């Protein structure tokens, strides 16, 4: 089975802190994604990466950055956390693209910024 | 651009009732269509998919048919169980080779015993 592991299930941080969310996949997938999930808004793509050291902005990249130094690991960074970044963050990975783009998700990290 | 519209929830049903969740989409060309399910406290997992017009995806008693003429991919189950309580997301991936999925807002379904 594909396994996507997010390092924390729950995080509480203070406004202005630098926050790292880590994600690791064990299936040698090329593509990795970070989403945030908010009630009524579904999933919104923050950043994605289709190769090591490559990254592309998604729909809502402002206030976030990412790092992909190794194929299996994709990190989301909040440079200076703000209260409007309180959300559920989901990491995903996929092998295919286009019509074969099945994404596999981690369990999520619920981040609260106080 | 691509977009997915789902019926708003929440939806509350009794066990053994019939479930339909409507999903319509806007996309150029011939996208692939997916239903993902999120059980409480978990991430999303693929429920079923269809890659071309008139294809029917099915899994765990759920079905959805890719209708290009109505740009729809409605999810149905004939007899729901309490264990089907979850959030359901419709999504599409277009044919251009893009890596991204476009998701609907999600529909929360609660099944009562």
Image: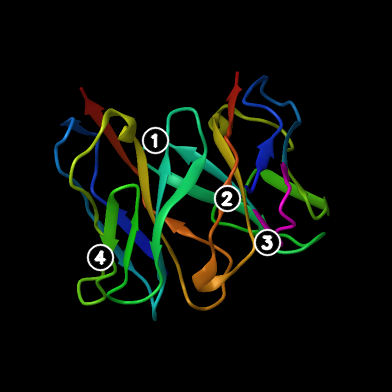
Residue A56 is marked as 3
Residues at circles 4 and 2 in contact by the CB criterion of under 8 Å: no
Q: Nearer the viewer, residue A38 or B55?
A: B55
- The residue range painted magenta reads A24-32
Q: Please tell me whether residue A41 is drawn above or below residue A57 in the rendered image.
A: above
N-terminal-most mark, 2 or 3? 3
> Residue A37, position in %: x, y?
49, 39
Residue B34 is at least partly visible in this image: no
Crowd band around label 1 with a 10 angstrom C-alpha radius: few (<14), some (14–19), many (20+) = few
Residue at image mark 4: B72
Magenta stretch contains residue A29:
yes
Residue at image location 54% in from the left, 41% down from the top: A36
Tell me which chain the residue with mark 4 is part of: B
Of tags 4 and 2, which is closer to the observer?
Answer: 2
Left or right position of A62 against B4: right
| Residue bearing the label numbered 2 | A104
Label 2 crowding class (10 Å Cα cut-off): few <14, some 14-19, many 20+? Answer: many
Q: Judge whether B32 appears above or below A33 on screen.
A: below
For disc 4, the neighbor class at 10 Å (few under 14, some 14 to 19, many from 20) is many
Q: Secondary structure at mark 4?
A: loop
Mark 2 or 3: in front is 2
Q: Residues within 10 Å of mark 3 (few under 14, many from 20)?
A: few
Q: In whole angstroms, how far apart are the C-alphas of marks 1 and 3?
A: 25 Å
Q: CA distance from mark 2 to mark 3?
A: 19 Å
């Amino acid at each position: 089975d594909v396994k996507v592991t997010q390092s924390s299930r729950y995080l509480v941080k203070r406004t202005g802190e630098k926050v790292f969310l880590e994600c690791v996949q064990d299936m040698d997938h090329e593509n990795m994604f970070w989403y945030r999930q908010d009630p009524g808004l579904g999933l919104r793509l923050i950043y994605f990466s289709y190769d090591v050291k490559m990254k592309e902005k998604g729909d809502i990249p402002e206030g976030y950055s990412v790092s992909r130094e190794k194929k299996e690991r994709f990190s989301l960074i909040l440079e200076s956390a703000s209260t409007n970044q309180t959300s559920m963050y989901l990491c995903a990975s996929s092998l295919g693209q286009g019509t074969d783009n099945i994404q596999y998700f981690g369990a999520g990290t619920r981040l609260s910024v106080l | 651009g691509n977009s997915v519209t789902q019926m708003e929830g929440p939806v509350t049903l009794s066990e053994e009732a019939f479930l339909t969740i409507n999903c319509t989409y806007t996309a150029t060309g011939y996208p692939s269509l997916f239903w993902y399910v999120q059980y409480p406290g978990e991430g999303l997992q693929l429920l079923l998919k269809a890659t071309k017009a008139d294809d029917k995806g099915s899994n765990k008693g759920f079905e959805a048919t890719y209708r290009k003429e109505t740009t729809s991919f409605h999810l149905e189950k004939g007899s729901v169980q309490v264990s089907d309580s979850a959030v359901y997301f419709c999504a599409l991936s277009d044919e251009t080779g893009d890596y991204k999925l476009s998701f609907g807002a999600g529909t929360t379904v609660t099944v009562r015993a």
